[in-house]
């Protein structure tokens, strides 16, 4: 009987350890700040997702780095500036409009204009032949 009690106590202790490890983060405000920063940073692996949405290992590492820096007392903007300094403007999900990112912002419109100009040219060539 004593052996069963010991085994039951060991089992309950193991279950309690699992519950403690699976508990949500103690600082919900910190996690909220981490998610706010993560929504502003691009996953460098996926490139079309924020690190908040991505499950790539690098995205998780960047999110953990943001969590560490925020826990150390840095502001959200300090963390974002650190990431930009380390990875460049590309890490921003919405990069600023600057001389080195103008093509990123205007590229789709330039391609659309080129496509429309080509379409008009082809249509005019067909009209001239008929």
Image: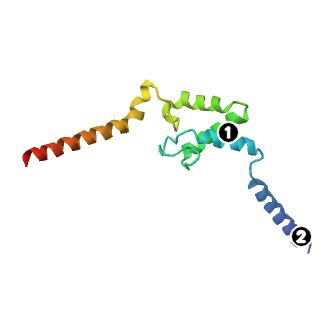
Residue at 52%, 42% (x, y): give it. Answer: 43
Residue at 17%, 44% (x, y): give it. Answer: 122
Q: Is residue 26 left or right of residue 63?
A: right
The image quadrant that residue 74 belongs to is: top right
> Where is residue 27 shown, x and y percent of the image?
76, 44
Inter-mark Cα distance, 2 to 1: 42 Å
> Where is residue 57 shown, x and y percent of the image?
55, 46
The image quadrant that residue 17 belongs to is: bottom right
> Where is residue 113 shown, x and y percent of the image?
30, 38
State how many labels appear.
2
Q: Nearer the viewer, residue 122 or 16?
A: 122
Q: Is residue 76 left or right of residue 6?
A: left
In the displayed image of the protein, which residue is found farthest to the right?
Answer: 2
Residue at 60%, 41% (x, y): give it. Answer: 38
**Above or below: residue 29 compared with residue 73:** below
Residue at 59%, 28% (x, y): give it. Answer: 81
- Circle 2 Cα neighbour tier, 10 Å, few/some/many (<14 / 14–19 / ≥20): few
Residue linked to disc 1: 67
SS at badge 1: helix
The N terminus appears in which quarter of the rendering? bottom right
Q: Nearer the viewer, residue 20 or 93?
A: 93
Label whose residue precedes the other's in the sequence (2 or 1): 2
**Above or below: residue 50 compared with residue 79:** below
Query: Tag on residue 11?
Result: none
Q: Nearer the viewer, mark 2 or mark 1?
A: 1
> Where is residue 35 shown, x and y percent of the image?
64, 43
Q: Is residue 78 left or right of residue 55?
A: right
- Circle 1 Cα neighbour tier, 10 Å, few/some/many (<14 / 14–19 / ≥20): many
SS at badge 2: helix
Residue linked to disc 2: 5
């Amino acid at each position: 009987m004593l052996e069963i009690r010991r085994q039951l106590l060991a089992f309950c202790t193991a279950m309690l350890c699992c519950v403690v490890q699976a508990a949500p983060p103690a600082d919900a405000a910190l996690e909220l700040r981490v998610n706010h920063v993560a929504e502003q940073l691009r996953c460098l692996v996926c490139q079309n997702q924020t690190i908040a949405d991505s499950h790539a290992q690098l995205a998780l590492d960047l999110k953990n780095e943001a969590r560490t820096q925020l826990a150390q007392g840095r502001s959200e903007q300090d963390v974002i500036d650190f990431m930009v300094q380390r990875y460049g403007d590309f890490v921003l999900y919405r990069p600023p409009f600057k001389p080195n990112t103008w093509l990123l912002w205007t590229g789709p419109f330039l391609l659309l204009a080129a496509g429309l100009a080509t379409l008009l040219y082809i249509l005019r060539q067909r009209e001239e032949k008929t």
